[in-house]
Image (cartoon, helix red, strand yellow):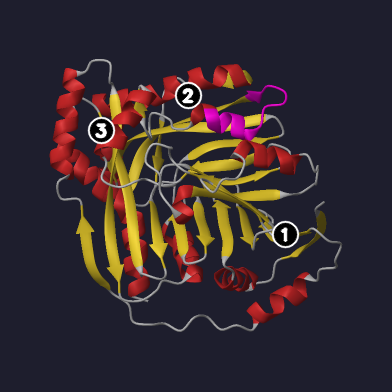
Amino acid sequence: MITVNSGCKKIKDDELQWLLQALAAYDVGAYFESTQDGHMWLAYGELDTWIKGTGQKNFKQWYQALSSLDVAHTWIFGAQQFSDQKPSHGLMQGRWFLPKLVVHIDSNQSLHWYQYSRTRQTFDYEQWLAPFRTMTASVKIKNSILTQQDEQDWRQRTTQLIDTLKQTPTLKKVVFARQRHLQLASNLSIPRIISRLKQQQANTYHVLLKSDHEWFVSATPERLVKLVNHHIYTAAVAGTIQRNQQYNRDEELAQHLMQDTKNRAEHQFVVQQINQQLKDLTLTLNVPDKPVILQNQQVQHLYTPISGIKRPKVTIFDFVDKLHPTPALGGMPTTTALAYIEQHEKYPRGIFAAPVGIANLQGDGELVVGIRAMHFDSQTKQAKLFAGAGILQDSSAEEEWRETDLKFLPMQQLIEDMLND
């Protein structure tokens, strides 16, 4: 049995900073912010946990067992691994958890808290927050990037992939990822990471998952699926070009992206796939005829919002099973593309490019795609940055290298700005 204590109040001026300091103090926690609707979620501790590959029941069984408790206002947080083909470990192997405490800050700056326990007990939110309210911000320690390691042979392997696509008509697209490993002199700060994300990446989701000494951080522009009150929302995001500080040049780049044959074809692959995948799960589905431009700080994308009404008894995880991985994350056809990724990418993706987010036990929630991301290990002080590019037979390995460099920038600049605090 799980019991819930809850409350609501107006948030105080410095309260978010106190809550972030509390997040840094917990071994397990999460932060999820949707800048589209102005909602923030913070999770502290773990009352129940599902970790992939530990001999537990599968995720669906774990989720259904929790859901059978029929506890209102109960939220889980986590991520699943990109695929089973190349297993990872630790946080990157995928995990979900039911927190001991959830704090939700809505768009009206009202703060809602939910405390979960297996025994009936009282809970005083203000008393819980008090130690973190008096805690000073972490002392600034001089930090630096000691080494940077890139996959220097990635362009050569991408050229081989392009040749394979030309010789294999049935293989249309492969999303090919690479990693950049940064060795830092000192640790990063979770409150500063969140604060910098909010400053630098105003038009993206802000996500942080924490498990012991491992953190996964994402400033993703891409929603996988949102489900609320029978309404389903998803989007196709594929096709990328850089930004420019000069307005006229920025507009020219956006128009070039909109008219570029390669990027429009890549984007249309994704739209068609999503449309096909969701038909069995929805009563109605609205798919616009052409994309619009989605702009982030460093890059801009082709973007098609897709919405509809779900069928009865369908949960958010039914949509995840259908949608992941989209052609923007894996390729087309999916099985063949994943097999190529398994064989030719150097490192396991873990939860990079995988579903990450929140869900409640009634089947609603929001999951995003864990891109523009990094994994940080506070024991080794190593940051792993992730980026991928959709490769077609008319792609250029050099152009795709530059595109992945752009996709590293959100996390690279996040780190470099914190080093210069």
Identify the residue under disc 1: 110
Q: Are marks 1 and 2 in contact (CB under 8 Å)?
A: no
**Quarter of image, res 11:** bottom right
Q: Earlier in the sequence, mark 1 or mark 2?
A: 1
- Identify the element where label 1 is drawn: strand
- What x and y, as percent, mark residue 350? 41, 47
In this view of the protein, which residue sits in the foreground, 81 or 390? 81
The answer to whether residue 327 is above or below residue 142 is: above
Identify the residue under disc 3: 256
Q: Amino acid at mark 3?
A: His
Residue 310 in magenta stretch = yes
Identify the residue under disc 2: 274
Residue found at the very far front of the displayed protein: 55
Closer to the eye: label 1 or 2: 2
Q: Earlier in the sequence, mark 1 or mark 3?
A: 1
Q: Earlier in the sequence, mark 3 or mark 2?
A: 3
In this view of the protein, which residue sits in the foreground, 93 or 21? 93
Residue 298 visible to an observer of this rendering:
no
